Image (spheres, rainbow, N blue to C red):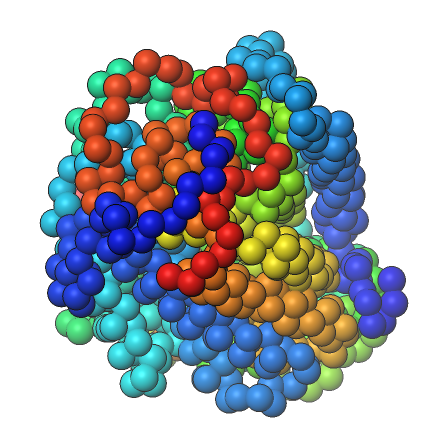
Amino acid sequence: MSKYFPLWPDRASTIAGQVDGLYIYLVLVSAVMTLLIFIAVAVLAVKYRRRPGVLPTPIEGSPILETAWSVIPFGVMLTFFIWGAVIFFKERTPPTNSTEVYVVAKQWMWKIEHMEGQREINELHVPVGENVKLIMTSQDVIHSFYIPAFRLKQDVIPGRYTTLWFKATEAGVYHLFCAEYCGTSHSGMIGNIVVMEPQDYTQWMAGGPSVPLPEAGKQLFTSLGCSTCHRFDIQGRGPNLQGAFGKPVLLEDGRTVMVDDNYVRESILNPNAKIVKGFTPVMPTFQGLVSDEQLNALVAYVKSLGQPAAGGAQNQAAAAPAGQPQKQVQ
Amino acid sequence: MATTVIPAQPASKPLNYLTNGSTIRSWLLTTDHKRIAILYLISVTMFFFLGGFFAMLIRLELLTPQGDLMHADTYNKVFTAHGMIMVFFFLIPVVPAILGNFLVPLMVGAKDLAFPRINLLSWYLYITAGAMMIHVLLNGGVDTGWTLYSPFSTQYSNTNVIEAGLAIFIAGFSSIFTGLNFIVTVHRMRAPGLTWDRLPLFVWANYATSLIMILGTPVIAITVVMVAVERLFHLGIFDPRLGGDPLLFQHLFWFYSHPAVYIMILPSMGVISELIACFSHKRIFGYKIVALSSIAIAVIGFLVWAHHMFVTGISLYAALIFSFITFFVGVPSAIKVFNWTATLYRGSISFATPMLYAFGFIGLFTIGGLTGLFLASLGIDVHVTDTYFVVSHFHYVMVGGVVMGYLGGMHFWWPKITGRMYPEAWAKLSALFVFVGFNLTFFPQFILGYVGMPRRYWQYPPEFQVLNILSTAGASVLAVGYLLPMIYFAWSLRYGPLAGPNPWGAAGLEWQTASPPPTFNFDETPVVTWEAYNYDEIEPKMEPTTLEAPVER
């Protein structure tokens, strides 16, 4: 409405309008229900107010009416459920062509790392009209990445990645809030989402020297000694990571897991949790040895190995036909 | 029912539970459920005003966008204190431990609860826990929020989390003992002829509540022990750096704390059923389904906890299932509201203060319940969870529901508890203050939440200020509405007109004994030959009966 009495936040993502649509529907249905009950109570109370000599009529109940006012409201609620579930399904299914951005939360700031190597604090620049997927983790307690203008929120949890995707529709500067209580400066853990026209974004992205994230990860991969076991030329003591990302892998205990951000992260911090079939648990943990930013770089690098044809940073190691993630004899 | 005026003869009066023993010892070592209810009344009221004091500090800080009244850490401790005190020391015990303790034995025609000494022990546990809570507050407070989310509570908070957790642990046992007592009493001590389908709905509601208390409370007890163990010994339960799972805490916490919402609201719903029946002067519409809906809420309430966790990254399909079951739990609540409304039809409706609170309850609980459906709907929840929308929703249920029911019940049974009537005009005025003040406080918070103001914010962007000012203004009106009854209830103890055994012309065994009741409730064990709410056998009254003009006692 006005600046002083707002009824809506800005509407700046593809999902925002859909959430508002459902919200309006819910408000209307609730208003009708509330009015019906208010009017029924008021009318009945006045009409049947106590008068001398007038006796009430005992009524036992009515199974038909009671069934009706159980089933009909439940039917209406099902529409709330289905509509809400459809929106949630979209919110939780990132398109495969999303631009990925890493977010590390800590008391009390947001650290953002773009794949191209740009880093920001408490600000996230994104272009209009592009699918953006945030891969987020926390260094300490639980935080929550909340952009009211996008109607989106996702808790950011230590020890794992959670993701949030959106497609911004309107250029502008929008609030970023931490929505999960995280201690002293919880209300100071705020920032800006800067949505830019694509050309402005390209210009912004070009400014400032930076090492692309997978490239930084590659350097770490060598300096931390990962490459001595995870080899691309011959079979090392660890699985060959060429082409591994994004594919299922069979484990020692017979389970199959998807090699995704969380699996790669877990395998660095807690290598013995899920051993690939045919390998022995010889890898030491890197818990405490690598920071969350370095982890993100390593994960981004492993991911880049999994996309032989992808643009951006490329591995100069063994060529594409790595084929199977791992094939190994006992 | 006798409406004749009986001259007062204080000297020859038989002893009632209030006059039977006047020493401090006779109160502190009493095993009389009615005296224990009075002990609870005094202590719970104290905690209500303490929690209310912290609420006022919150509202004052939020008058301006800048954090200027207190430091951020202080603010965090203030809202934590508000939440912990209101949830564990007010909302959970308020109706069961005060009205339930007083009324359940009377309503089932028993001399006392099944385990009178355990009942006294439950009050001492409550007081011990309360004293520890106050000790925590006096020694720097605690800053985790009442939800104690890990790993903040286990590894990062520098405040006295363990002692606060221990207070919650002990308060939990107090409520387990109350629940245990009610269950055994309802099973074993009903008067002859008082079958299950003749029980008052208030007893049904407290029975359902007791089931949740004894099944759910141990889980929160275990959870706070785990928090303490991780804090003290760095045993990795919740902190991922120690190998724990941070979401495990939330699963355990909400497994209790969502059903706990029903521990709070169910007894109040029971009160409303009694009020609507009495002041419509007829049997509640669909007695059986209203009784069973309490049990349904207790059972289904255990299956919805993860709807507090839709944005934590739980799996998509888990979220869908929990969302669905959450809509399901809305049905028994809706049934109650519709059946109460239908009870008015062809009734004989009196607008006494308790009934005004019942109307208020229906209105506010309807809004609270419907906004709960917003939150159950996944697409909306992602946007409004952890914002003021949630704050407003649960205050509509907790304050609009529980407190309205409690105040309605206090006015209704005040003549039974004290033997005196409260001043009706003042009571109506205060009910109006409560209703208007409540809506002014909390309705703007729905809008605030949708616009995007996160909860637990000490400072906020300036565009949220106007709505916050409205909310603070409403809180001031609400405070007057809560203080007024304190004054006129106290006044009525001395100057209120003496009430007869049944001033309202109400059905129910508690109205068939003297006001205040004798220590063992009934001179003879009643034999029940009638159905619940046999209002067709009672003449409706235009005014409450009083025995005499106001006199000093």
For this rendering, which residue is in front, B241 or B233?
Answer: B233
For this rendering, which residue is in front, A212 or A255?
Answer: A255
Q: Is residue B486 left or right of residue B206?
A: right
Image location (x, y in percent) of residue A302: 45, 61
For this rendering, which residue is in front, A195 or B210?
Answer: B210
Image quadrant of residue A120?
Answer: bottom right
Q: What residue is rendered at 25% in x and 48% in y?
A: B12
Examine the rendered structure and indicate whether residue B364 appears above or below residue B162: above
Residue B141 at least partly seen = yes
Q: What residue is rendered at 83% in x and 62% in y?
A: A170
Examine the rendered structure and indicate whether residue B279 appears above or below residue A129: above
Examine the rendered structure and indicate whether residue B533 appears above or below residue A105: above
- Quadrant containing the N terminus of chain B is top left
Q: Is residue A260 left or right of residue A46?
A: left
Q: Is residue B508 left or right of residue B72?
A: left
Q: Is residue B215 left or right of residue A206?
A: left
Image location (x, y in percent) of residue B298: 38, 34
Residue B298 at least partly seen = no
Q: What residue is rendered at 20% in x and 28% in y?
A: B524
